[in-house]
Image: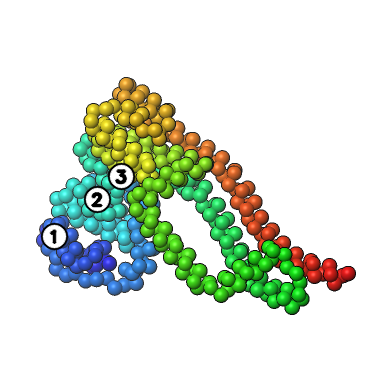
Amino acid sequence: MRFTYRALSDGKYISSKVEAQSEREVVEYLRGMGCVPISISEDKSIMAGSLGKMFNRVSSDDIINFTRQFAIMLNAGLTITSSLDILHQQTSKASLQDLYTNILSSIKSGDSFSKAISQQHHFSHLYVALIKAGEASGKLNDVMAKMADDLEKQRAFMSKVRGTMVYPIIIIIGVIGVIVIMLLFVVPQLSGLYTEMGVELPMSTVILIKSSDLLMKFWPILLVACIGGFVLLKRLFSLEKNKFLLDKAIIATPKVGDIIVKATLVSATRTLSLLIQSGVLMLESLSIVTNTTGNLVFQQSFRNIYRSVQNGITLSDAFAREQIFPPILIQMIAVGERTGKLDDVVRKISDYFEMQTDSAIKTATTLIEPLTLVLLGVVVFIIVMSVLTPIYTLTSSIGQ
């Protein structure tokens, strides 16, 4: 829910909007910023509803743009509060205005920038940790600029990966759509014609007609079953044990698994390099990498690496203990430890894995595109032949 509040802060009246579960949560939020709540009311406007949240939420692109703009302003010599004021004035998006207002209020009440953004759920643990490191080193502008570069690279990289996966999904949905349309609208009309003419039907046509009858009679039940199956699968794979098995199966899948593995390594090594370069301690860096890794198989390996390093084992040896990482990664980390340039080496290995992923994506695309088209062609051919064969038989018998 969204609430509109009016409060007293440092002798001045402020008013804004905030997302919260209840009025009590808003009160606690305002008191935490050192403000005295005066009035709180639920925002009943249309944009405050679920539709409004969908179109007015703070997106990942918004965070990337904020990081880039904020870094530019800090490098230009502006203060944090001045930069936030300018960003607030420039945006017309209500959710971003609320975000900037909340961050500004926290800073004006005495909180650090890192603490202010940690109170906003739009920023990840990695983002907050990097801001803390930037504040501690006095190089917040440099850290923000590097973060912006990394976030933009990650956005472009993930766009490539998703693009590879989207194409076959669209083709499969198209195939299913063609089958459903044929079964619902075309086959029932032809079925009556075949019955009237008394044509002997081949097995493929019989199966097609039976499937059409089944879909026509029981489509509500089938629809509910599909939705129920989807919900059940989602719940099953929300359990960590089942999700781990699914992630393991995905990694073992030819071509697709190779892309997922390399994409995960790109993200993990890039994050680790940025954290080390920003001055974050190794154990905290490994903890953040573990929490930001989506694949549970890799997440478990990073958790094991964290424990090994905590027990005094070198990072390269800790990686070597896990069978999932390629030898080149372990060798490069060992080189980085010996030369004292671990952050640079990990960054280079991240770039290497990104090039490998690009190559794997191109290879997969060249294989997936013809395979999906062949699949579509085979399905359409079978349906068309099942429909036309009885008609051909009928015309042949009439001609004789």
Q: Earlier in the sequence, mark 1 or mark 3?
A: 1
396 lies above or below 142: below
Question: Residue under circle 3?
Answer: 291
Nearest to N terminus: mark 3 or mark 2:
2
Res. 124 visible in picture: yes
Left-right relation of 138 to 290: left
Mark 2, secondary structure of its residue: helix
Give, as a three-letter code, the residue at label 1.
Arg
Q: How many marks?
A: 3
Amino acid type of the residue that numbered disc 3 sits on in the rendered structure = Asn
Q: Residue at x 68, y 59 (%)?
A: 382
Q: Nearer the viewer, mark 1 or mark 3?
A: 3
Looking at the rendering, in which quadrant would you find the C terminus?
A: bottom right
- Which mark, by number, is residue 357? none
The image shows residue 304 at horizontal and vertical percentages of 30, 36
* Residue farthest toward the right in the current orientation of the protein: 400
